[in-house]
Image: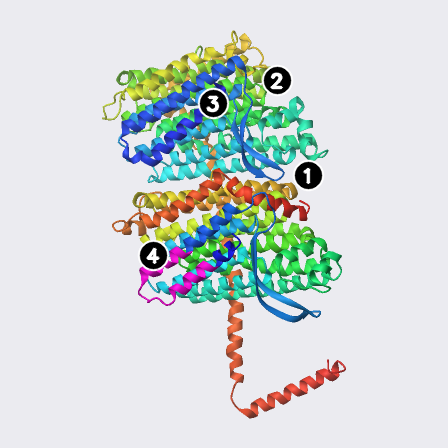
Amino acid sequence: MANEAWLIPAIPLLVYVILLVAGRRISEPVVAGISVSAVLLAFLLAIAVLADVAVNGPTAPTTYAWLDFGAHSLTVGYEVTMLNALMLVVVTLVSALVLLFSRSYMKGDERFSRFYQYLNLFVFSMLGLVISPNLLQFYIFWELVGVCSYLLVGFWYYKPEAAAAAKKAFIVTRIGDVGLFIGIILLYIATGTFDFNGLYTAGGAAFSQVATLAYHGASVPFGMSSSGFITLTALLVFIGAVGKSAQFPLHVWLPDAMEGPTPVSALIHAATMVAAGVYLVARMQPLFAASPVASETVAVIGGITALLAASIGLTQRDIKRVIAYSTVSQLGYMMMALGVGAYTAGIFHLMTHAFFKALLFLTAGSVIHALDTQDLFSMGGLRKKMPITHIAFLAGALALAGVPPFAGFWSKDEILSAAFQSGHYVLYAMGLLAAFFTAFYIFRVYFLVFWGEAKGEKHAHEGGSAMVIPLLVLGALATLSGFLNTPFDPFVTRFLTYGHPLGIGIDPPASLPLILVSVIIALLGIWLAYSVYGRANRGAELAKRMGVLYTLSYNKFYIDEIYHYLIVTPIFTIARAIAFIDRFIIDGIVRMLGELGYTGGVTLKYANTGQVQTYGVLTLFGLVALVAIALGIGGVL
Amino acid sequence: MQNVLLMIVLIPVIAALLILPLKARAHAITRSIGMLGSLLSALFALAAYIAFQRSDAAYQFVLSVPWATINNAFAGTPLTITFAFAVDGISLPLVMLTGIVSVMAALRSFRVTERVKAHYVWQMLLVSGLYGVFAAADLFTFFFFLEVTLVASFFLILIFGQERREYAAFKFLIYRGIASVFLLLGFVGLAYALANSATTVSASQYMAYGPNFMSLNLLQLLDESVKAPLALGAQTWLFFVFLFAVLIEEAFVPFHTWLIDTHEQSDTSTNMLIGGVLMKVGLYIMLRFVVSILPLALAAYSEWLAILGVISILYGAFAAIAARDWRRLIAFSGISHMGLVLLAIGSMHALGLQGAVFMLVSSGLLTALLFYTVGAQAERTGTYEIGKLGGLSKSLPVLSGVLLVAALGTVGLPGLSGFISEITLFISSFERFPVVSTLGTLGMILAALYLLFAMQRTTFGPAQGAAQEGQGIARDASVTEAIPLLVLVAFVIAIGVFPNILGVVVHPTVQALAGRIGG
């Protein structure tokens, strides 16, 4: 079955083409029907592929010639590894549910079929990225994922905020992409290949020695040391992941990206866009494993991001913005896991997070759909009016907060204990504090939205079955998927480490005291949220007491403003300066030369008087001058 | 097939001759002849692509037509001036590019309503000149057709440009005229330098050419330059003469201001041909004459090429950010992208040369597409000014969609033609100039900045300004208008997804060429 894995991305691509050609002529239910069943079919195929590799192990890449390239030939193709088999399942499952949800959410939108068209392209790009057997193809799909997210965030292009958010997402991730681009180029220069397998088998466990020598005989490019070169390329690759997975300092695009329709947010935050960066680091694990410096950097950036984003999430007023910051923060955990060497914990968290984050966004979408507002302080009392949404959100919130036995508990706890047991105590403490914040902010949302008094006149009610079914499925997954990888039965770990892939260690077993600490922290956060927002809204009081800390958090630490003054303004200043130089100095000189030629001509024309006497005198002068020169230089030339 | 190149070059001239005796008001038949002429030439170009021997790095379809003989031209031997044509894996893609863009420009010229006859006559001559330049296998032929493009473009700008057309046309003429002088100097120098060396070479040469021999034939000159390479001193002088000509022809900073005025003043089809094809000639000169015949000088000064390239990349990108007029933006974007090609040539590596050819073709298609799209928008809104446009997506979805594709292609999005060019040439340049190349990659970020800003300003947001006023009358692309858009987009995607349709042709030639420069 794994040999037919190419079908999985091909299906949404086919639907994309159909909608591109005939989308306008197909009715809404048919558009949605085709799309959902296609991705569902892809999901079933992915399950079959997963079952296949679980039994038979990963497949070798299938490749086709693509471009004659220097002394080499580039190929494209696909391969199924344990990691990407799991990713295929997660991506197709979450995407199918989001596509189904959009059926109701986008109902009646003028560009309904266009929306589904983009979503299919988005899913195709992500699936293509996942089964890429080489870095170049990976990068191609990586960029396509970025463009799809650009198109979808800016789907309501006539809204200025949406247009600005789309542009910001594209340009900020582009900065990361250029890092990855350079990293890929340097790896190619060193190894002469883009193939993941080529990179790894050439390098093996000792990636640092063999791979870099494969191409250049005995020398590493630019006269660098082998370890220095590995660190450099790993960090460049990581810059790409920082952009895509919204890690500090390139995290600023993701919270704004919620300007897109909510199902898009669910897709971007859960299954497609941001997962790509984490996947990249996981896929390049042997490279990172070969460089302690790069690994530490990944872990530290992850830890900073987790804490920073969580502390911003505490005070935001927009429901989607809180959830968006929680994504940034959770991605930080994943990076931290990969950085401290807890490979399977990172991937497992990617998976559980995909489920509960899609759930949170879709429930938020359901709430927004019902109330027509995103402001938390205009919401309340939805517990009774929207019981299914309420339960679903609660399951997602408990999973995010890390309360056992919900999914997030198992995966987050693995990460924290891996950080602790690998001796990263500061990171562990940061992760723990972020976990406390997380529990607080998500239950702040929960109490504000579902408890208290109903506000506004709009009659809130549940959406249709297309909106409810995805909530139920994801709710079940957010509740139960944690059991796929418990300390008692680490199924996912065993699966991912099938045949001991290179550079991947088995995570240490969890310890009971650490588990207890995490649980207590989570419950403390929830209790605090309950005491501030659950009984009566005493948020303003708390905000006043926190003073400057509140202001910093509410204003996102002014990072956007800092970037504006440090980066955006200088770029436009330079551009204006160059425009000035261009117009007035360079072209000014050009025009001056032109004027000189013209003036010279105009002046000389007065010498043409038409009087023979004048010509005669001038000729005489000329003759005398010539004779003088001839005598001066001693001879007639 | 032997005459295929002659056909390609002659057909547009014949079309021009057929148009000349027509009545000034016979618009329909004028347009048809112009269109048919362009199409027929392009089909012959396609035939050449199909018949081209892929694995062969040598010149193909060689044809030489003697024209005049000068007795006692050099040391008592005669010099025969010929019209000679041939293509290899570097020139064939550019002949194809000319074919594609010229047909689309001919379609675009359907929109011209004043002095239709003159427009088509000069346009046909410009197209013929462009084909001739790329298909030339002889210094004289090359120069002759280059001058044809100069004169034809001059009249196209002068007659059909906007209010400051005279200024722009003369600036164009003076700048490119100066470039031509240097090029002529370079050609004459090349012929003399290699003629001298012929006296000192092998017996077989002696048998073939006699004791003293001078030739303008490119194949013979290349042959000579391999068997008896020029000394570094001679190469250096010629290198600088050629370089100066190229810097002007290709509008590298600071010799670029003529291009900005030209693009701001010309009409759309002229801009497509100038920006899309003529602006690739300078770097073609670099590949054709400098890389192959003056490798020692190139090696000695390759760092300087890389630095000049990066200056153009960054200067062009920043100037594009500040541009308020779409045509100005496209012009600077073109300068920025041609800087990449110079950087690639400076890297002296087969991949760099391959990336250079890819970039010439890709940038040619995308520039033509951009000019076409903003021209069609300006026709409806009455302005090229970015600040006056807005929200066109609503009223002009097709044109706005194409503008999006063109912008993303220019930014270097994978799946479109720009990306494969960029990664190929950067792999080559990073190996030799890691620091300079890193600066060059900033151009990729800046390109995203200026293109997305301008594109979003034009098509996103609420309809406003000129778009709003024009909304009642504005119609999206008609069928004849949509064809060029779709064809150009199709080629941009085809090269992006299946780069080997270009790669199989380019690859053997650049591998062989790289052998000369030790790459």
Q: Chain of mark 4?
A: B
Mark 3 vs mark 2: give the one in front.
Answer: 3
- Which residue position holds label 3? A5
**Amino acid under disc 2:** Gly
Task: Give the image location of residue A341, x and y in percent.
Answer: 59, 20
Marks 4 and 3, how far apart at CA: 50 Å
Q: Are marks 1 and 4 on the same chain?
A: no
- Tell me which residue sits at (27%, 49%) in the image: B471
Q: Is residue B494 visible?
A: yes
Same-chain status of marks 4 and 3 = no
Residue under numbered circle 4: B111
Comparing labels 2 and 4, the label whose residue is closer to the camera:
4
**Do badges 3 and 1 share one subunit?**
yes
* Amino acid found under the numbered disc labelled 3: Ala
Q: Residues within 10 Å of mark 2 (few under 14, many from 20)?
A: few
Name the residue at 50% across, 65% down: B173
- Name the chain under label 1: A
**Are there few (<14), some (14-19), or many (20+) residues within 10 Å of tag 1?**
few
Q: CA distance from mark 2 to mark 1?
A: 35 Å
Report the magenta stretch's main SS.
Answer: helix
Q: Which residue is mark 2?
A: A423
- Of A232 and A195, nearer the camera is A195
State the separation of the CA atoms marked 2 and 4: 73 Å
The span shown in magenta is B10-37
Q: Is residue A571 above or below residue A288?
A: below
Amino acid type shown at disc 4: Arg
Asked if the stretch drawn in magenta spans residue A151, the answer is no
Which of label 2 and label 1 is nearer to you?
A: 1
Rendered position, A136 above or below B381: above
